[in-house]
Image (cartoon, rainbow, N blue to C red):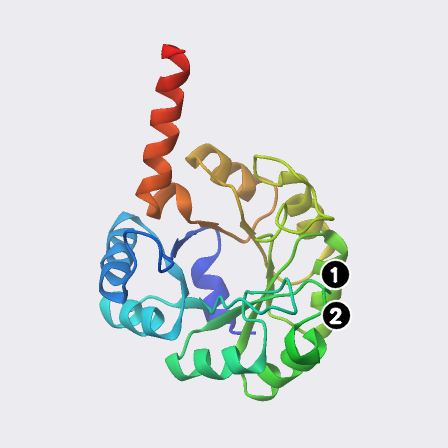
Amino acid sequence: MDQQLFAAIKGKLIVSCQALEHEPLFGSAIMARMARAAKEGGAVAIRSNTPVDIAAIKAETGLPVVGLLKRDYPDSEVYITATRKEIDELMEAGPELIALDATRRSRPNGETLEELVAYMKERGQGIMADISTLEEALYAESLGVDCVSTTLSGYTPYSRQDDGPDFELLQQAAERLSIPVIAEGKIESPEQAARMLELGAHAVVVGSAITRPQLITARYAQAMEKVQA
């Protein structure tokens, strides 16, 4: 574990700067500027998708990056850094941490979570395990990951399904694990982010509520439409 990195992000905000191909802000130059804006607002690290975006963000901001690579596979529900191929591509960009789906669902090509974690540890690569349940968090810790994140709560069919952040999972994981637990997922207000710290989060990741203006705009528009109904 990189003690300096985790000391630097403790109690702080990590902003997820991601845009997929169908989204209006897609492009590494745009994401780099978004990350720069996040840094000016107080973010101490960035979570980013794809090697090209990671490289652009590191060059623009100098901040540590949690890198991931989303890729759909026909034979698996896992799409966040699903195989060794994604890991190899990401390591070329040099993210301080690589985030991967750490659920125990079957992965593409018959690869396993255990193999991928061992592969990264052998190469000295920092690992963030994205989990959806306490059991997954405990298992990821047993494999030797550097930290876990509650990213996937509500995004697996067997985890808690709710519109809001999973405060309970965060608190339970923070109480049970000896490695840092990062709060992420459906955090839409500064108050919710602060609450996560009160419950034991080492740091908090916020994405869509900051960096996806189309979704932020929709929340306002929908609220106003209800008044007109």
Return the x and y of residue 78 as percentages of the image width and height.
Answer: 62, 64
Q: Which element carries disc 2, helix, strand or loop? A: helix
Return the x and y of residue 202 as percentages of the image width and height.
Answer: 55, 53
Q: Which element carries disc 1, helix, strand or loop? A: helix
Q: Quadrant of the N terminus?
A: bottom right
Task: Find residue 213 and report its image quarter.
Answer: top left
Residue 20 placement, left or right of 198:
left
Task: Find residue 143 and report its image quarter.
Answer: bottom right
Q: Amino acid at mark 1?
A: Leu
**Alpha-carbon span between mark 1 and mark 2:** 6 Å
Relative depth, front residue between 28 and 205? 28
Q: Quadrant of the C terminus?
A: top left
Relative depth, front residue between 157 and 137? 157
213 above or below 34? above
Residue that badge 1 annotates:
138
Return the x and y of residue 136 as percentages of the image width and height.
Answer: 73, 59
Q: Residue at coordinates 49% horizontally, 84% vertically from top-left?
A: 88
202 above or below 216? below
Q: Residue furthest bottom?
A: 122
Residue 99 placement, left or right of 141:
left
Residue that badge 2 annotates:
142
